[in-house]
Image (cartoon, helix red, strand yellow):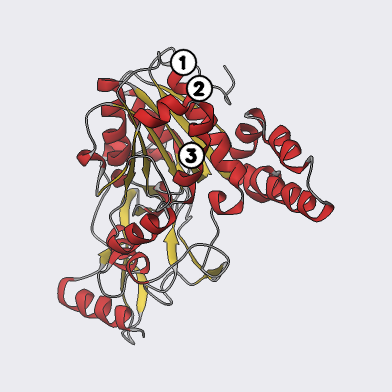
Amino acid sequence: MNPLGEKLAALIEQEGPLTIADYMAICLFDPAHGYYTTREPFGAAGDFTTAPEISQMFGELVAVWLYSAWQAAGSPRPLCIAEIGPGRGTLMKDLIRTLSQLDPGLAGEVRFALVEASPRLTEVQKQTLAGSTFSVDWFRQVGDLPWVSTLFVGNEIFDAIPMRQFVRRDGRWRERCVGLDGDGKLTFVQGPGEPDPGLLPADAGSAEEGTLIELAPARNALMDAVAERIARDGGAAIFFDYGHLETGYGDTLQAVRRHAFDEVLGAPGEADLTSHVDFAALGAVAAQYGLSTHMATQGDFLLAMGLRERAGLLGRSADAETRERIVGEARRLAAFDEMGELFKVLAVTPRGVVPPGFAA
């Protein structure tokens, strides 16, 4: 058992089984051994590669969407563009570059903000954006942002926010937890907790024995904070993540290490822990504020925003090898058997605003 595993075992022995949410939070954010506090997870040399790292085209098309959504909402000023969970800062770098080409005057007015809780990743982002001539600020949470019209963007942020699991046993929902087996090793156990009935889908009472459901109140809380600001001050939001457009059942908790799946309980703090995002639940939170929500697969969205045309333009004067690379990047972002179908897009706008990239 690695050092964080030993720490977890001692905590369980002292206080009892941990919820899946607590286990995820410790594995990802423990100050001494947490995944995001101790390593560089992004890119080919890390454990996974995100869309902004695959191609500049992703950030360019997102920037076009943000600009169009801002115009559709009446071009409110002053304006903040805030990325939540900005990774290495690659997406923000592409957003700033593209917006400065679309509307140099607006880019000079915008307050670009990165919402990042990790001091280590903040330093990485500052290095990525070191050459920017525009105003860039860092904030630890959404609540710290200025109260002005804001365009929010987040790529693979909700999947890393801890969620809870509940299993149907004897006609009741019981929490799935992490405990210890007879040899002192981490294992899944049944805990005493029960879910908030308000978070369960309407058909939860008729679910079969052994059915598992994942609920993520912490994710809903983040969407609540974003929606509150859009409802009060205007703006819009767009989020990309892997998940499902309708609430469902099943175990999606997974560990990723060196670009492959790993054991969830195998090496705490050494693998990324995520689960699929329930976009319907997030959309329902935004709808409570009177906002409109728009959902699509990532592939459909990027193609609607002009991915093919952008790839063709970039490859027009390039050599054969570069054109092949560009086509490969576009395919990886949008193809059905790559990221195009698994990854979904959720946009939040003021009611009546129909942004580009989504069916009316």
Which residue in the protein does label 1 denote?
A: 72
Q: Quick one: SS at disc 1?
A: helix
Q: Which residue is painted at 71% across and 41% down in the image?
A: 314
Q: Is residue 287 left or right of residue 155?
A: left
Q: Is residue 258 left or right of residue 74?
A: right
Do callouts 3 and 1 mark residues in contact (Cβ within 8 Å)?
no
Q: Is residue 191 above or below residue 235?
A: below
Could you tell me residue 191's position as x and y percent? Answer: 27, 62
Do callouts 2 and 1 mark residues in contact (Cβ within 8 Å)?
yes
Is residue 36 shown to the viewer in this render? yes
Q: Amino acid at mark 1?
A: Ala
Whole-Å distance between the Cαs marked 2 and 1?
A: 6 Å
Q: Which residue is painted at 61% across and 49% down in the image?
A: 55
Which residue in the protein does label 3 denote?
A: 95
Q: Which residue is painted at 60% across and 32% down in the image?
A: 301
In the depicted view, which residue is nearer to us: 119 or 265?
119
Could you tell me residue 356's position as x and y percent? Answer: 56, 22
Q: Amino acid at mark 3?
A: Leu
Q: Quick one: SS at disc 2?
A: helix
Q: Amino acid at mark 2?
A: Ser
In the depicted view, which residue is nearer to us: 199 or 70?
70
Q: Residues within 10 Å of mark 2 (few under 14, many from 20)?
A: some
Q: Which residue is painted at 61% across and 42% down in the image?
A: 57
Whole-Å distance between the Cαs marked 3 and 1?
A: 18 Å
